[in-house]
Amino acid sequence: MKKDYQRPIDFKQGRVDMTHGAGGRAAAQLVSELFARAFDNEFLAQGNDGALLPVAPELVDGGKLVMACDGHVVSPIFFPGGDLGSLAVHGTVNDVAMLGARPLYLSASFIIEEGYPLADLKRVVESMAAASREAGVPVVTGDTKVVEQGKGDGVFIATTGVGVVPRGRVIGGALARPGDVVLLSGSIGDHGVAVLSKRESLDFETTIESDSAALNTLVANLLAAVPEGAVHVLRDPTRGGLATTLNEITRQSGVGMLLQEAAIVVKPQVDAACELLRLDPLYVANEGKFIAVVAADAAEAALAAIHDHPLGRDAARIGVVIADDHHFVQMDTRFGGRRVVDWLSGEQLPRIC
C-alpha cells in the first residue's frame, strides 16, 4: 500500500462524524471528494479561505453591488420537485434578482449533524451544484461545520449571493405608486403544499410538486422588454405567501392595493389540498414565483415578456396599486364582495424553506 494512500469516503454506507468538521485530514477529504468535486469552478479551485473575483463590467460603468443572504432549514430535506440543496440556490439567486440585479456568485455554509448519512449529504450537494450550474451562478467559496448528534436536524445551509445592478436602475419595495399594475408570474401555493404533503405523508391523486426555481433569467426577460424604470417593485412571495408579501410592499411604499381574486391562479390540486388542510393558498409559501409592480403603460409588454418564458406561462395581472392611507391590501372576491387581505397571523407552515 502506498504511504500516502487514503481510503475513499464511503458515500453509500458512511455517516458524518465529528472529524469531518474538525479541520484535519477527514475534513479536507470531505471537502475534496464531495464539495470541491461537485461545485468545481475556477474560483473555488483557488483553494483559499475566500475567492478572488473579477470586477463586473456593470461596476466599472457605475453600477452597484447587490448582496443577499439566506438560511435554509426546510423539513423534510427532500420533497416533490426539489430538496434543500436546490432550494438554497434558488432562494438566494432570486433574492438578488428581485433587486433587478444580475446574480454572479454564491457562497455556501453547511451545518451538518453528526451521524447524518453521507449518501444523503452527497445527494443534497450534487443537487445544489446542478441548480447552481443551471442558474449560471457558481458557488465560489464555502464552509463546513459538524455539530453533535441531537444538536442539529440533518443539514442546514446558509448562503450568500452577490450580484450587480446597472447604473441608474432602482427597484425596491418602497417604489410602488398609485396607478401601477400588479403582476404575478404564476400559480401560488405549490411549494408549501408539496413540502407539507411530504412531511405529513399525505397522498393525493395528482402529485403536487414544489415550484422551486431560479428566476434570474425570467427577470432578465422582463427588464429587457420594458423601458428602464418601468418596473418599480420585484418581490418573491416566499414565507407568508402572496398576501404577506403584498402587505410588506404596501406598508413600505405607503399605498394600498386592490386585487382580483379570479385572476390569481391556484392549481386545482393545490386548492383541494389547501381546503383539506384548512390552509389559505394566499398565505402558502412559493419558491419559484415573483410579484412585479410596474407602470401602467408598460404592463402589457411586461406581462407578454413573462409569458414568453417557460417559468411564466401562467402569469397574470392580479390587481392595481391605489392610494390608501391605511395601506390595506383589498380583494374583490369571486362572489362579488370585497375583503381585506391581512398579514399572516402566527406561523402557518414552519420549516418551509
Image (tube, rainbow, N blue to C red):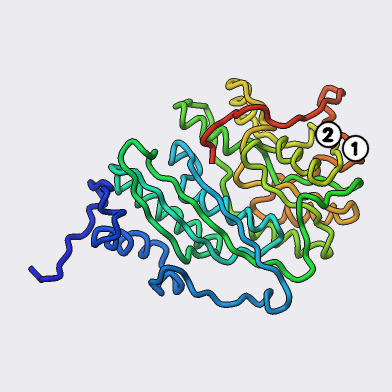
The C terminus, quarter of image: top right
Position of residue 76 in the picture relative to residue 262 (left or right): left
Indicate the position of residue 330 as horizontal and vertical percent values.
Answer: 83, 32
Label disc, if present, on residue 328 of the rendered structure: 2
- Residue at x 62%, y 65% (from the top left corner): 163
Indicate the position of residue 191 as horizontal and vertical percent values.
Answer: 57, 39
Indicate the position of residue 256 as horizontal and vertical percent values.
Answer: 86, 38
Indicate the position of residue 102 as horizontal and vertical percent values.
Answer: 65, 65
- Residue at x 66%, y 37% (from the top left corner): 241
Callout 2: 10 Å neighbours few (<14), some, many (20+)?
Answer: many
Residue at mark 2 to residue at mark 1: CA–CA distance: 7 Å
* Res 333 quadrant in image: top right
Q: Are marks 2 and 1 in contact (CB under 8 Å)?
A: yes
Q: Nearer the viewer, residue 311 or 250?
A: 250
Q: Is residue 95 above or below residue 151?
A: below
Q: Amino acid at mark 1?
A: Asp
Q: Nearer the viewer, residue 146 or 236?
A: 146
Callout 1: 10 Å neighbours few (<14), some, many (20+)?
Answer: some
User: In terms of secondary structure, where does tag 2 sit?
Assistant: loop
* Res 55 quadrant in image: bottom right
Q: Nearer the viewer, residue 27 or 6?
A: 27
Q: Which residue is mark 1?
A: 324
Q: Amino acid at mark 2?
A: Phe
User: In terms of secondary structure, where does tag 1 sit?
Assistant: loop
Q: Residue furthest left?
A: 1
Q: Is residue 157 above or below residue 274?
A: below
